[in-house]
């Protein structure tokens, strides 16, 4: 498959953004390709389209599966695995947020709680103890807020996002 200029720009840019977010460039490019194409693709076609090594595509597909961002889709009459992703940008966003929460936030909260429960905590300076408590409070509040946001319908999330500073102004009125 040959990508048109706009599709090529989208895929390349998504790869660049992925690398800035800590995701392998090829992983992000494959996800962008599957999102744009909107139909299941076999690994060899992904390899040819992106011009990357087959082994790189294979490893990247495994990573995307581990992130629950792609699925294997069987195609009648074709023994190859085909891969697809959701076309719903909100579902993709929610999946990424949930996966990052489980991989990054939840373990950090556990470590912070362990630090505060440690019998050696009193050996730390009071300022350090306070900072650990504040970090835990922030992480727990942000985690709870994230869980609540993930339960909202996309239309509600969009309305909240469009409100922007109006929410701050409303909260200032309530004080």
Image: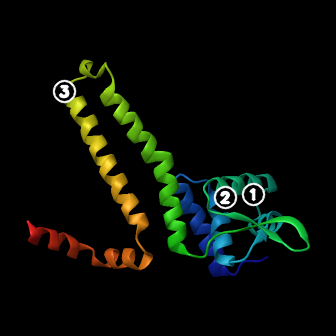
- Residue with the mark numbered 3: 126
The disc, 2 or 3, on the residue closer to the chain's N-terminal end is 2
**In the rendered image, which quarter contains the C terminus?**
bottom left
The disc, 1 or 2, on the residue closer to the chain's N-terminal end is 2
Residue 26, labelled with which disc?
2
The one nearer the camera, 21 or 153, is 153
The disc, 3 or 1, on the residue closer to the chain's N-terminal end is 1
Give the spatial CA distance, label 1 vs label 2: 7 Å
Residue occupying image coordinates x 69% and y 81%: 4
User: Which colouring convention does the figure follow?
Assistant: rainbow
- Residue with the mark numbered 1: 57
In the image, 136: left or right of 75? left
Task: State the SS at label 1.
Answer: helix
Viewer-nearest of discs 3 and 1: 3
Residue 23 horizontal/vertical position (percent): 57, 54
Give the spatial CA distance, label 3 vs label 1: 50 Å
Residue occupying image coordinates x 50% and y 72%: 90
Residue occupying image coordinates x 46% and y 46%: 104
Residue 24, labelled with which disc?
none
Residue 45 horizontal/vertical position (percent): 81, 69
Q: Tell me whether circle 2 and circle 3 mark residues in contact (CB < 8 Å).
A: no
**In the rendered image, which quarter contains the N terminus?**
bottom right
Residue 157 horizontal/vertical position (percent): 38, 74
The one nearer the camera, 10 or 98, is 98
Residue occupying image coordinates x 71% and y 57%: 61
Q: Is residue 58 above or below residue 130?
A: below
């Amino acid at each position: 498959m040959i990508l048109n200029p706009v599709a090529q720009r989208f895929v390349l840019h998504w790869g660049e953004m992925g690398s800035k977010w800590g995701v392998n460039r090829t992983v992000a490019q494959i996800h962008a390709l599957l999102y744009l194409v909107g139909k299941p693709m076999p690994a060899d076609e992904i390899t040819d389209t992106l011009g990357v090594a087959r082994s790189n595509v294979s490893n990247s597909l495994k990573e995307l599966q581990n992130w629950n961002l792609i699925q294997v889709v069987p195609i009648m009459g074709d023994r190859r695995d085909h891969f697809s992703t959701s076309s719903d940008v909100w579902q993709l966003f929610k999946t990424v947020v949930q996966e990052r929460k489980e991989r990054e936030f939840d373990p950090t909260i556990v470590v912070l709680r362990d630090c505060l429960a440690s019998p050696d905590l009193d050996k730390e300076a009071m300022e350090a103890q306070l900072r650990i408590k504040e970090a835990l409070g922030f992480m727990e509040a942000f985690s709870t807020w994230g869980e609540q946001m993930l339960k909202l319908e996309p239309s509600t999330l969009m309305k909240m996002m469009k409100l922007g500073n109006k929410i701050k102004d409303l909260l200032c009125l309530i004080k």
